[in-house]
């Protein structure tokens, strides 16, 4: 079976266009704002900040999974849910245990992640460093 040169060129153009299109979609989904991926430990902030924040991005969406850890004396409360991100605005939806959704503002500063968010009627501004 012989393949014509025009058909081969057409196939190559289609494959290249598919890669360019997939790259563009990936770029648009991940464009803007700080990189949230990882586990972040509280470095500075007021009492009541989450002690640990973990973002697990989903490459097929504009968000992913999130877990938050709140420590009060010796009691540790974990929250699990999902988040969506648009530039530096993050919307968090907690479903285990259920809690009202809330918005975070993220800012990257050298090796730190600054998060500002309302939680249980108070506003917090907290700085986190990536936990190894």
Image: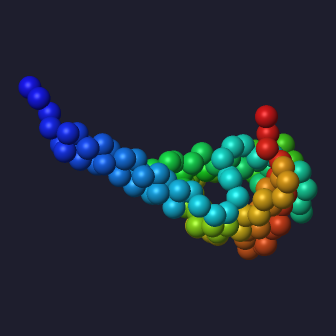
Residue found 42% across the figure and 52% down from its top: 20
Most extreme residue toward the top is 1
Position of 57 relative to 124 (above/below): above
Left or right of 118, for residue 22: left
Residue found 35% across the figure and 52% down from its top: 17
Left or right of 83, for residue 24: left
Q: Position of residue 77 (x, y in %)?
A: 71, 48
Q: Position of residue 66 (x, y in %)?
A: 61, 50
Q: Position of residue 24 (x, y in %)?
A: 47, 57
Position of 112 relative to 87 (above/below): above
- Residue 16 in sight in this render: yes
Q: Position of residue 108 (x, y in %)?
A: 78, 59
Left or right of 72, for residue 80: left
Tally the marks. 0
Q: Quadrant of the C terminus?
A: top right
Residue 117 placement: quadrant: bottom right
Most extreme residue toward the front is 5
Q: Nearer the viewer, residue 51 or 63?
A: 63
Position of 38 relative to 25 (above/below): above
Residue found 71% across the figure and 68% down from its top: 105
Residue found 60% across the figure and 45% down from its top: 56
Left or right of 19, for residue 40: right
Q: Quadrant of the N terminus?
A: top left
């Amino acid at each position: 079976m012989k393949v014509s040169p025009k058909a081969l060129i057409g196939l190559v153009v289609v494959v290249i266009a598919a890669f360019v299109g997939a790259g563009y979609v990936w770029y648009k989904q991940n464009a803007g704002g700080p990189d949230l991926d990882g586990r972040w430990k509280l470095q500075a902030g007021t009492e009541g900040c989450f002690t640990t924040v973990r973002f697990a991005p989903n490459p097929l969406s504009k968000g992913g999974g999130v877990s938050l850890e709140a420590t009060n004396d010796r009691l540790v409360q974990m929250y699990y849910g999902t988040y969506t991100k648009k530039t530096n605005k993050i919307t968090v939806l907690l479903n285990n245990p259920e809690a009202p959704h809330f918005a975070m503002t993220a800012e990257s500063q050298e090796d730190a992640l600054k998060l500002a968010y309302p939680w249980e009627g108070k506003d917090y501004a907290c700085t986190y460093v990536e936990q190894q």
